[in-house]
Image (tube, grey):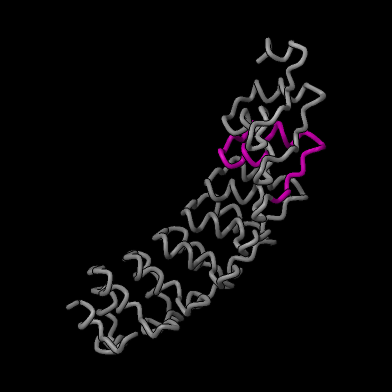
Amino acid sequence: MTVLLRHAGISPDGPSNDSRTPLMNAARNGHKGVVKALLQQPEVNPDSTDCFGQTPLFHASWAGHEEVVKILLGRQEVRPDRANVTGRTPLSLAAWGGHEGAVKRLLEREEVNPDRPDDYGVTPLSQAAQTGHLAVAKILLGRKDVDPDRLDNRNRTPLSRAAEGGHDEVVIILLAREEVDPNRPDDNGKTPLLHAALNGQAEVVKILLGRDQVDAGHLDDSGNSALLYAVSWGHVHVADILLARKVINPEKPGSGSQTPLLHSAC
């Protein structure tokens, strides 16, 4: 890299076909020394974007390279809360990847909105909840400016996403917040319990059923219950847990007027 940078005619900021620069590649791969060398070149733009609207800081945050994130944040030209073409920020990508160090570095900047949604309404907390990154979820929940029950464009909450993925520890810390509604339906009428049952997440089903607010017999907009979903997809352990709740009627029909028993026979 040092030899190449000495040669006249070689652009240290020359992009590839997808508009990715050498600095972006170095940042994505965590090459701290190369990043420093490139940033010493006056032609290099530390906040340039590729074809997806992602800067070197995006690439470093997505890959979790904390030291590179720190270096880039030290440049005045770098906008730490800049959004890409889908509205996601470096913090959103770091949260999705579970990169605790990068998340902490980004949150040190006042310009960074820890609750900023992307174009789909998904916040960094929802990203961490969906991927099950407990440490990052705890950091974000420690911020007063983060809404733990914020809805995305499909009326999904962080709890809904954590329940779907079977991330029981994240489910527990979300349920510890008074603002979180454990029975909130999304735009299809599915509650966190229905998402957990549909995906066979037995431990999450147990946790949710331990909350008085959770309606075990709730029907979504298609008329299906958690029990019907569990039976339809062969999640035996989930069905056993649900049937242990006396309030659930195992003969109640769902969509197509079929009962759980009829579904299990298909």
> Residue, x 35% and y 81% (percent of image)?
225
Residue 92 on image: x %, y %: 61, 51
Residue 135 on image: x %, y %: 52, 49
Counting labels gives: 0
> Residue, x 68% and y 49% (percent of image)?
84
Q: Is residue 111 left or right of residue 229?
A: right
> Residue, x 46% and y 54% (percent of image)?
132
Q: Quadrant of residue 21?
A: top right
Nearer to me, 137 or 264: 264
Nearer to me, 254 or 215: 254
Residue 169 on image: x %, y %: 43, 58
Q: Quadrant of residue 35?
A: top right
Q: Is residue 1 magenta?
A: no
Residue 227 on image: x %, y %: 30, 78
Q: Tell me if residue 208 comes above or below residue 251 in the rendering.
A: above
Q: Is residue 74 magenta?
A: yes
Q: Quadrant of the N terminus?
A: top right
Q: Tell me if residue 125 comes above or below residue 156 in the rendering.
A: above
> Residue, x 30% and y 79% (percent of image)?
228
Q: Quadrant of the C terminus?
A: bottom left
Q: Is residue 22 left or right of residue 207?
A: right
Nearer to me, 205 or 41: 41
Nearer to me, 192 or 265: 265
Q: Quadrant of residue 241?
A: bottom left
Q: Residue furthest front?
A: 17
Q: Which residues are magenta?
A: 57-83
